[in-house]
Image: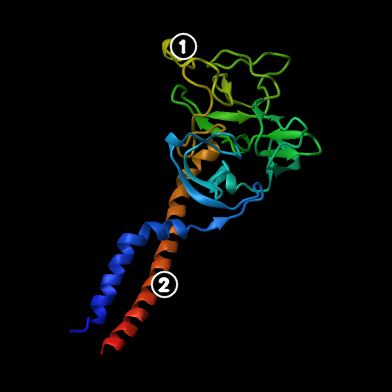
Amino acid sequence: LKPLSLTRITKQLKTSITRKQILAIMASRKPSVRHPSHSHPLRGHKAQAEEEIICSGCDLDLVGAAFKCTKSECDYFLHKSCFDLPRETRHKSHPDHPLTLLYSPPYESSTYTCDACGEYGSGFVYNCSICKWDLHVGCVFMPELVEREDHAHPLTLLYRTPYQNGLIFNCDVCQEAVPDNLWSYYCKECDYGTHLHFCAVEEEEEEEEAPKKRGGGICGRGSTSNGGNKGGRGSATSELAAMLEAQREMEKMQIELHLEMQRAKIAKKARKACLKLI
């Protein structure tokens, strides 16, 4: 029998690995990581809209780069941005003390009320234990300036009402009062302001009344002034697009490294096989 050449043996083995085992290698080589908010290891995951996943950290919809629990029976997911949140931060709205990231509310009710938007929360929270001050992780990173398509000037983030002497500040989109202690977006030049997040207005009403209102549409959460990315409690989610590409590159490098190691082993085995056939 004519012995097979080293090149032919190696080429056949390489082709077999590439075609039949690449998907298995990709799945098996994804590294697991730990996060202090969860007792099980987590693994990288690309969440699709149709999965309807809710992030276990910020309680918002999860689409894009994420981490999921490696245990099939455990329904724990985190945005990549929630996974990377700093354990401590300082904020202009609360300059006297740092805010600490807690993975669950520190209260018996297991919920908290955000001091920025006034909404409830049950997941991650930035907390000042001295002042009992709590912020959603998304509210902490709201942009200081946003732009709206229906207003000519940028809106500035305020940490309390822009009015003095007991005047009531009404949102110029939904016409509802904004409590004095909650954050808002405001244009001083036009005396135009909005809630921090979406207004509770039906979409059909918005479409019908938008031409009549000075600020038709939805409140806040317009595009940021430095790049057109949307603000709001979903601002943490908006960071995922930039992180997703970096995660993909890291996964590619890990796969390529593993394949190179496999090919080196294959070449070594092929040489031994050829020596036996001589």
Name the residue tied to disc 2.
261
Name the residue tied to disc 1.
205
Judging from the image, what secondary structure is the residue with disc 1 in?
helix
Q: Residues within 10 Å of mark 2 (few under 14, many from 20)?
A: few
Q: Position of residue 178 (x, y in %)?
A: 64, 18
User: Where, quadrant-wise, is the C terminus in this rendering?
Assistant: bottom left
Residue sitting nearer the eye, 139 or 214: 139
Where 96 falls versus 43 (above or below)? above
Residue furthest right in the image: 130
Residue 219 relative to residue 251: left or right: right
User: What is the quadrant of residue 93 in the picture?
Assistant: top right
User: Where, quadrant-wise, is the N terminus in this rendering?
Assistant: bottom left
Residue furthest bottom in the image: 278
**Amino acid type, mark 1:** Glu
The residue at the point 60 percent across, 30 percent down is: 157
Nearer mark to the viewer, of 2 and 1: 2
> Alpha-carbon distance for marks 2 and 1?
61 Å
